Image: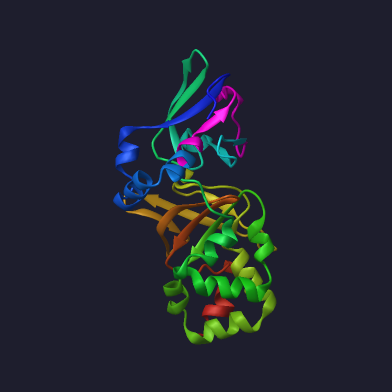
Amino acid sequence: MDFLGRFTIFAPTNAAFSALPASTLTALGNDVTALQNVLKYHVVPGSVYKSVAFNELKVRTFNGQSIRFNVYQHVNKVTIEGSEIIQFDRKAINGVIHVINKVMVPPTGDIVDLVVKTPAVSTLLSLVQRAGIANALKTESITVFAPTNDAFARLPQAVVNQITSDPNLLREVLEYHVVPHTEYSAGLYDGELLPTLDSNHDTIQLHVDSTGVRVNQNGHVTTADVDATNGVVHLIDNVLIPARYYLSIIGRK
């Protein structure tokens, strides 16, 4: 890495490094190339000050991948690839430093790639392929609340049959889990309404408290902030049904 010129460093705190899984720390300690790749992912050419950051701004790092700013005004937070920036604009003679609360690990693919590599959402993958909406999950700046295999298994078989036998209904239900902008956990707040990609742009409502995040009434986020090159995935433990279909689907179980 050439440190001549000006650059921006997103510097994780000591606590951020300590929070990494022991397996990740060990792997990075044993692989110099991987460690260099992670460190380069925190460095951007030029000086990027808070004043020029805006929501969904992407900047290219020294490892060749881009990282994304998100500005969450309702909670007064700014994140970079989901990591909250807790100190801004610490000036150096050749650039600027922003302190962040998480180590950013470069994602290895887009959301479809991520779903393919995650066994816990294999049912979702098969349904996405069946509905022909994989390309929608490759678009830029999206959030997917992804039901796990266990979530689909909780549905009565009659409900599964009804959803999967109607291509339009299947597409609507799946797209109801996709938000057309990037929502990391740092930006979520209680009562927030998020539009979805279904044809009616139906909203989902978030419930945020000390126990975690719940989507609508029963979709608990079990794993948050799974990063991808085109957005973020949150795993949830229940399948979400748009209200306009709920009675006709659940009522027939």
- In the image, is 34 to the left or to the right of 135? left
Residue extending farthest to the top is 93
Q: Note whether residue 252 is visible.
A: no
- Residue 82 placed where, x, y %? 48, 43
Residue 160 vs residue 34, the one in the foreground = 34
- Residue 70 placed where, x, y %? 55, 38
Residue 83 belongs to the span the image colors magenta = no
- Residue at image position (55%, 69%) is 241
Residue 200 vs residue 85, the one in the foreground = 85
Residue 31 vs residue 250, the one in the foreground = 31
Residue 53 belongs to the span the image colors magenta = yes
- Residue at image position (62%, 48%) is 141
Q: Is residue 149 above or below residue 9?
A: below
Q: Note whether residue 89 is visible.
A: yes
Residue 83 vs residue 180, the one in the foreground = 83
- Residue at image position (53%, 47%) is 183
Image quadrant where residue 11 sits: top left
- Residue 206 placed where, x, y %? 47, 53
- Residue 166 placed where, x, y %? 66, 81
- Residue at image position (43%, 78%) is 154
Which stretch did the figure color magenta?
38-58
